[in-house]
Amino acid sequence: MKEIDQKLAGKIERLTNKTFKFDERIKEGWFSAVYFLKTKEIVEEKIGSNHVTMQFFQKSNAVLCGTDEAIALLHTFADNPETLEIHSLKDGDKIRPYESVLTISGAYQQFGFLEGIIDGILGRRTSVATNVYNVVKAARTSGEQKPVIFMGDRDDHYTQQAGDGYSAFIGGSTAQATHAMNEWWGKEGMGTMPHALIQMFRGDIVAATKAYHEMYPEDDIAALVDYNNDVITDSLKVAREFGKELKSVRLDTSGNLVDKYFLRNHHLMGTFDPRGVNPELIFALRKALNDEGYSHVKIMASGGFTEDRITYYEKMGVPVDMYGVGRSLLRINIGFTGDDVLLNGTHSAKEGRRYRPNPRLKEVEYFAES
């Protein structure tokens, strides 16, 4: 059983290194800023006995993510981790600016060299989780929750997919493009066809969709319809071919193009930006499908969608049933700071920072891997 299933079933409190699979070079300080490594050596040689409390915070209203990973990091690489006192919020908690989300107490040389790595984990995971949460929230502006598919594989380094996929899950996305994105939270990647498949069939959307369906008959039929820059014509082609079997069509028109529908209907132009995927094109597509009896076919829109753009579409009542979102969900816009705020039980922090006790923090038990 995957750890995420055990956690969701209440059998374990947090995910561990069995899920995260850390690089062993962390123990050697390979990923720590050199000044943390030098400080560790100086403290060991010159000070020895000390007990510090380090607290972590950020400056936004956000959805916290990365605490399980940070705690697993400490339990794996800190010296004598069983002696550390760790208090933390949980992944998925809503947090406020300057709220303490994690505190670690122990001898500085036990864990201080991990400070920057913890900041990075919390910053990236919380940024992605918060971005996804905001987009998912935008996708229910109309009162109906529209699914958001996390399609960030082409916008980031492949080594980040598992962590970003987990963060997206914490933020509310339960459909993701690759198996790696689903690794930590126990699902499989989902998707239909890329433009390359249609190219191989020389732009014949019906032939490409037939081939897909013959190879993957258990999958819902979902056709990508913008390859020829004529989404209404191609949507009707696949709808006429597959009828009730066609579940959805996806628009991913380049923002540099004007769909051929508008070139055939010049009288519609002049009051809106006709480039790319736009509300008027989706309204026209919905009407065309409905007029021919294909009201069951759902419309998925992708290509440059953001929280603000989805909110706009939903407020306008644009008939999108699903959104595919990638790049905007991966913006790292939240940074965490770790501060030593207590030294041997005495308040001690740099000017402008102070110890901020948080009654929401819960003590973390040491988990030794079996």
Image: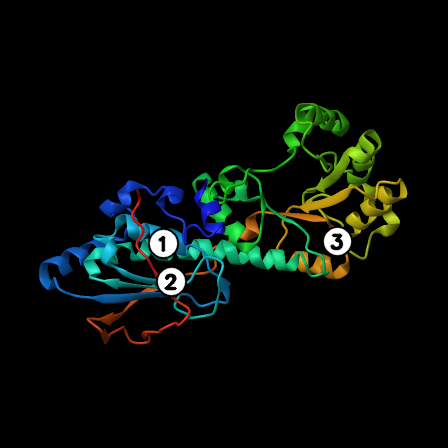
Residue situated in front as seen by the camera: 345 or 98: 345
Q: Give coordinates of residue 43: x percent, y percent.
A: 15, 60
Residue situated in front as seen by the camera: 84 or 32: 84
Mark before the other along the chain sequence, 2 or 3: 2
Q: Which residue is mark 2?
A: 88
Q: Residue at x 24, y 48 (%)?
A: 29
For numbered disc 3, what is the local secondary structure?
loop
Q: Bin the neighbour count of mark 3 within 10 Å (Cα to Cα): few under 14, some 14-19, many 20 and up.
A: few
Q: Residues at badges 2 and 1 in contact (C-beta under 8 Å)? A: yes
Quadrant of res 116: bottom left
Q: Which residue is mark 3?
A: 273
Q: Residues at badges 1 and 3 in contact (C-beta under 8 Å)? A: no
Q: Marks 2 and 1: which is nearer the front?
A: 2
Q: Residue at x 66, y 23 (%)?
A: 215
Left or right of 78? Residue 305 is right
Q: Bin the neighbour count of mark 2 within 10 Å (Cα to Cα): few under 14, some 14-19, many 20 and up.
A: many
For numbered disc 1, what is the local secondary structure?
helix
Q: Which residue is mark 1?
A: 70
Quadrant of res 160: top left
